[in-house]
Each structure stands twice: as structure tokens, then as C-alpha cells.
Amino acid sequence: MARIRLVEHAPGAPGLRWFGLGPDLKPSRGLLKLRRLLHKHAFWAQERNTADLKRMLAGSTVVVSLWRGKRMVGFGRATSDGIHRAVLWDVVVAGDLQGRGLGRRVVEALLSAKAIRNAERVYLMTTNSSGFYQQMGFELASPQQLLIRNQ
């Protein structure tokens, strides 16, 4: 298997967002590859368009991606106030590479980022991967309840 590289993007991921940069800051059509990764492997993000992805990245405190050669195979992002709260978002690994520790690499990179590591509490929401996150030290948030207001 080709080596998998982790890219830690600058806050707001301007290189990825504006120029599609990937590993070694090389143009790689990264935004298109992110869209494909989410469309194919993230049921919650299948309908995101390029304009929405750009806005999403711009508002992200921490952004990481995983690359196998020229293919983006993993992604995750986080937002934080840097002291009290942080939230992990959109952690995804290509289905054909799951079970190899790549999701763990993404989450560990997010949690170790300066803007996240000192947050008093880190939140995330998951539909069907709670066992994975519990292995990484996350706990069910009982008695808290998730509330949603759809637009």
C-alpha cells in the first residue's frame, strides 16, 4: 500500500479552499477530491457543493486531510474558541481503507492541534460510529440531549 500522508492545513484551509493544494502544497484539485470523498463516503455530506465546502472550510479552526498518492482518503475538521469548547466535524475515511487506523490518525491530529488540545470539552456527533469514538476516550453525553433546529 502506498504511504498515507497527513496534511495539517492552515486555519480556514486557504490553500485547499482557493487553490486545491494537497501534500507539499502542490495543486491537486483538493476541493474536488474533498467533494468526491464526502459524496462517496459520508452520507451526511453527500449533497454539499463546492461553494458550500469553501464556506465550511473558511469557518473551520483546524482542518486535516489524508492522502494516498494523489487521492484524498480521509478528512476531518474542528471549530473551537480555544479554551472552553471545541467540536469535531466531518471525520471521514474512504470505505476501502477503513479499519487501518486512519480515522484514529485524523481524530488524533484534530485533538492535538493547538486550538483544540486545551479546550475544556470537545464535542462530536455521530450516527453510527460511537464505538469508534469511545475507544478514543469520548463518552456518551448523558444526561445532555442533542437538539437540532433545521433551516
Image: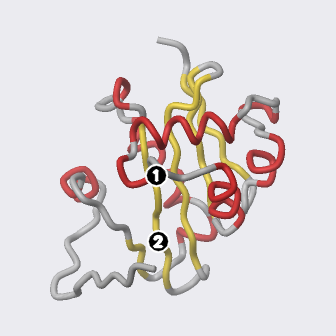
Residue 110 versus residue 22: which sits nearer the camera?
22
Q: Nearer the viewer, residue 58 or 104?
A: 58
147 on left or right of 107: left
Residue 52 appears in which quarter of the rendering? bottom right
Name the residue rendered at 54%, 59% in the picture.
Answer: 112
Quick check: 44 left or right of 86?
left
Q: Secondary structure at mark 2?
A: strand
Look at 43% across and 45% down and name the residue there. 92
Q: Spatial distance from mark 2 to mark 1, Cα to Cα?
A: 13 Å
Q: Residue furthest top?
A: 1
Along the line of sight, which residue is nearer the eye, 141 or 128?
A: 128
x and y, in percent, of residue 122 in the image: 42, 73
User: Residue at position x 73%, y 54% from top?
Assistant: 13
Residue 87 badge: 2
Mark 2: amino acid: Val
Relative to 79, residue 18 above or below: above
Q: Position of residue 110 (x, y in %)?
A: 53, 57
Secondary structure at badge 1 equals helix
Circle 1 is placed at which residue position?
A: 108
Q: Position of residue 103 (x, y in %)?
A: 39, 42
Q: Nearer the viewer, mark 2 or mark 1?
A: 2
Q: Is residue 144 above or below residue 128?
A: below
Residue 150: name its quadrant.
Answer: bottom left
Q: Is residue 72 above or below residue 78?
A: above
User: Above or below — where is 31 with respect to 51?
Assistant: above
The amino acid beneath tag 1 is: Glu
Q: Indicate which disc, 2 or 1, sits on the residue closer to the N terminus.
A: 2
Task: Give the residue at x 73% y 32%.
Answer: 29
